[in-house]
Amino acid sequence: MPVLLFVLQLAATLIMVGLIWFVQLVHYPLLGAVGEPQFAEYEQAHCRLTGYVVIPPMLVELATAAAMLAWRPDGVPRWVPLAGMGLLAVVWLSTFVLQAPAHGRLVGGYEAATHHLLVASNWLRTSAWTARGGLLGWVCWQLLSAQR
């Protein structure tokens, strides 16, 4: 069971790593090019539809990361799930304290300062998810190396 939890966590995390880099480098910067007349409608649709893509892997990632605190695969040091949960705390706090409120303001219409805050603050999530991906990649390497 611990290896299955790890594989599910790795898959969910890597999905989010790819998605957050796309959002950081493409999607969020392009919000500024939508145009004022359509922006509020676009942002409302963005907020509604993005949840379908991000909520399932985020919940799987959170559940499996929490489970890994209790059930670790053999050879996985105790600090790994603790560090992973710390990085997830950064992601979730950043989401609810910085990005969600920025989106909430942008639903009312484009604001350059809020858009800039959204793009700049999203580097916190991008960095934390990338670090999680690297951490879990290292664990995967360790687990596969131990199988030889």
Image (cartoon, rainbow, N blue to C red):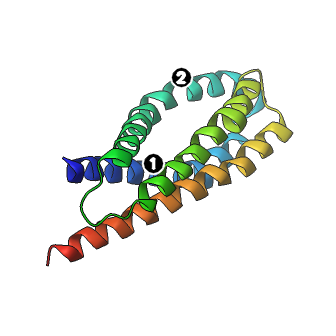
Query: Which amino acid, by three-letter code, is at mark 1?
Result: Met
Q: Is residue 145 above or below residue 13?
A: below
Marks 2/1 in contact by CB < 8 Å: the verdict is no
Q: Quadrant of the C terminus?
A: bottom left
The CA distance from mark 2 to mark 1 is 18 Å
Q: Residues within 10 Å of mark 2 (few under 14, many from 20)?
A: few
Q: Position of residue 112 (x, y in %)?
A: 84, 39
Q: Is residue 44 above or below residue 84?
A: above
Tell me what residue is drawn at x 29 percent, y 48 percent: 71
Residue 142 picture quarter: bottom left
Tell me what residue is drawn at x 32 percent, y 63 percent: 76
Label 2 element class: helix
Comparing 115 with 69, the one in front is 69
Q: Residues within 10 Å of mark 1 (few under 14, many from 20)?
A: many
Number of marks in the image?
2
Residue 109 badge: none
**Upstream in sequence: badge 2 or badge 1:** 1
Q: Is residue 74 left or right of residue 94?
A: left
Which residue is the extreme one toward the right? 113
Q: Nearer the observer, disc 2 or disc 1? A: 1
Residue 48 badge: 2
Comparing 111 with 15, the one in front is 15
Residue on which disc 1 sits: 16
Tell me what residue is drawn at x 48 percent, y 58 percent: 132
Q: Position of residue 147 (x, y in %)?
A: 15, 73
Q: Position of residue 126 (x, y in %)?
A: 59, 54
Query: Which amino acid, by three-letter code, is at mark 2?
Result: Arg
Q: Position of residue 119 (x, y in %)?
A: 71, 48
Tell me what residue is drawn at x 38 percent, y 37 percent: 63
Label 1 element class: helix
Q: Is residue 75 left or right of residue 77?
A: left
